[in-house]
Amino acid sequence: MSQGNEKVLLVTDSNPQSQLFVDYIHGKLACPVTILAPDAVIDDIECQHMLVLMDADHVSDDITQQWHYKAAECDQISLAAFNLRDEDHATEVLASLHLQGVFYRSDSLELICKGITTLLDGDLWMSRSLMTRMIDFYRRQQLNAFRPVCGLTQREIEIIGLLGSGASNTEIADKLFVSEHTVKSHLYNIFRKINVHNRIQAMNWARDNLGLPMPPHKPRSKAL
């Protein structure tokens, strides 16, 4: 590991388990490791060379976005996420956040320390297969930016984008402040324009044509 003032900031709930995690990392890497509560004021964090490890089990999407903006303002801050379920989950997170590294729930402490060392040296820490998936995602996203989307209106693109991310009709209606009836009407028009017959086909179309990641695994409504 490069010598300097490297610091590891663990964004998670403070409890005996997380403290043991901190003590282990500090003992192995001999660098300062601090726990920061997920609801702490990020603007108060000094811009310095540090690795911010965000706990996917305890950090909300809003907080991760705040750290995303903080790292964009300070190029000395590197971001990584841990406690991710699997590669699908990592792909979903990386679609909206620029992370330098990801760690899974199944990773050993030894492997996590190796990854932290790599990240502190300024390199990426993620599998070759994950990087291949993300390169393909960004390539499709770039191509689709220059391709008309089957005559869909901006509102229809918003709706099928949410659908492709796994949102239900109710969730789409709440997100866009419209009624479920309006969402269903838009979906009928969308299905006709993109020539699909059900939600699964529409979700696959959205991922293929809008560059959306795989949705999280959860039960979905069978209704249109």
Image: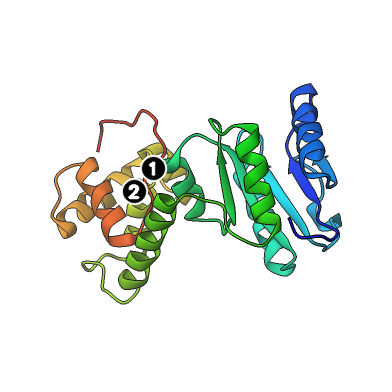
> Which residue is label 2 attached to?
164
Task: Name the element at disc 1.
Answer: loop
Please state the horizontal and vertical placement of residue 161, each as a whole percent of the image. Answer: 36, 54
Report how far apart the C-alphas of labels 2 and 1 lie in the structure. 7 Å
Eye-nearest disc, 2 or 1:
1
Image location of residue 64, percent across then percent down: 64, 49
Query: Residue 75's image quarter?
Result: bottom right
| Residue type of the residue flagged with mark 2 | Gly
Which residue is at the front of the view, 14 or 76? Answer: 76
Labels 2 & 1 near each other (Cβ < 8 A): yes
Identify which residue, 62 or 97, lies in the foreground.
Answer: 97
Residue 163 seen in render? yes
Residue that carries the numbered disc 1 in the rendered image: 215
Colour scheme of the picture: rainbow
Residue at 81% x, 32% y is 23
Quick check: 158 above or below 18? below
**Against 41, is 12 above or below?**
above
In the structure shown, which secondary structural element does the residue marked by tag 2 occupy?
Answer: helix
- Residue 135 - label: none
Q: Which residue is drawn at 60% across and 46% down?
A: 61
**What residue do we see at 32% from left, 65% from top?**
140
